[in-house]
Image: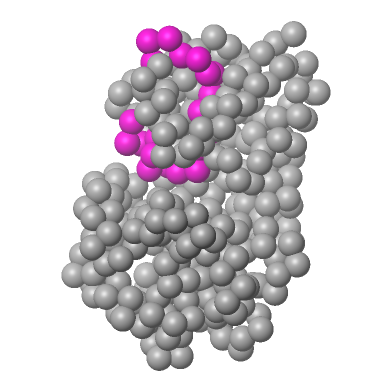
Amino acid sequence: MKELVVYSGRNRPDLAPVYRLFERLTDTTVTVEKVYHHDAEQRVVDERSDPQADLLLTNSQLALELVRESGVFDPYEAPVAREYADWLRAPDYAWLSFTAWPRVAMVNRRHESQPTRLEDFATPGYRDKVACASLVEMTTVAQFAAIRVAKGSDYTESLIDRLVANGLRIYKSNLFTREALAREDLTAALANSSNVHVFYLEGNPVGEAWLDQEEGGLGTHVEAHTVAVLKGCKHPESARDFVDFLLTPEIQSMLARLYGETPVNPRADHGWVRPLANIRRMDAPLSKVAAYLDSTLELLRSKGFEVAGADT
């Protein structure tokens, strides 16, 4: 029996159906240890002299890019990844994206609002009615870091100030943010598009609004869930086999259907998920966003985006 050990910094939605299918199709025993996403990369760096896992899965390209130079990953040029746009993989294939997560507005369909620009949330019609996750979610930090790259720091700080002055409501996590949208009857929330699909399938009256898609507009910040083979791991063949499996049209279609995640394999069945080819992406290269990450964290902290408490 073959084996595969996975550290997963991506813990919601659970990839259990994918692991189970891989086990049964390949006679491989898969062991998954869930690791808090802020700790996952440091965990593998600390264990690099004696890797205890074969694969790292997490919910951010940035997180893996920031530790790539440590040499903890074993680059794998998966056949599907050879066809990737450059932004979907590390330059040396040390990490690969396996589904994308564009940032959208989750809108409450009980309201007759359909925002078209992020700037809309700084206008009187949205006062005290828009939600966003706090700094515990790097998706929030990454989005504003990307805006700094695309539009400059002065513009970004002014936008944040206007959003906060208009009553932007900050919640501990993406989960609390989407729950608050329904519980408090807010109008919209900044969210990953997959959050909208999952929340809708739970019976909540939500939809998605794609912001800044006009010609010459800011565009959408798009990040991705990522996977990397660990250098010196005990089961490298199983690790590479799982990466290939994860990128097949079958599994990409499954993740779109189950969780509303955006396939990176264009041959997948996207269903109601908007294909990457139909999204105007923000002009913000990953390397430049990474350089702004720490200072953006401090900027948002100074504007009140740090929230503590499990019930916030």
Q: Nearer the viewer, residue 266 or 305?
A: 305
Give the vertical position of 39 relative to 86 (above or below).
above
The residue located at (71%, 17%) in the rendering is 29
Q: Does the image show residue 215?
A: no
Query: Is residue 38 toward the left or the right of residue 98 in the image?
Result: left
Position of residue 112 measured from the top left corner of the image (x, y, whole percent): 61, 88
Per the rendered image, the range of residues in magenta is 48-67
Position of residue 144 measured from the top left corner of the image (x, y, whole percent): 33, 61
Reply yes or no: does residue 210 show up in magenta: no
Position of residue 228 measured from the top left corner of the image (x, y, whole percent): 49, 28
Position of residue 207 measured from the top left corner of the image (x, y, whole percent): 64, 72
Quadrant housing residue 122: bottom left
The residue located at (38%, 43%) in the rendering is 62
Give the vertical position of 135 relative to 42 (above or below).
below
View extreme (right): residue: 24
View extreme (bottom): residue: 124
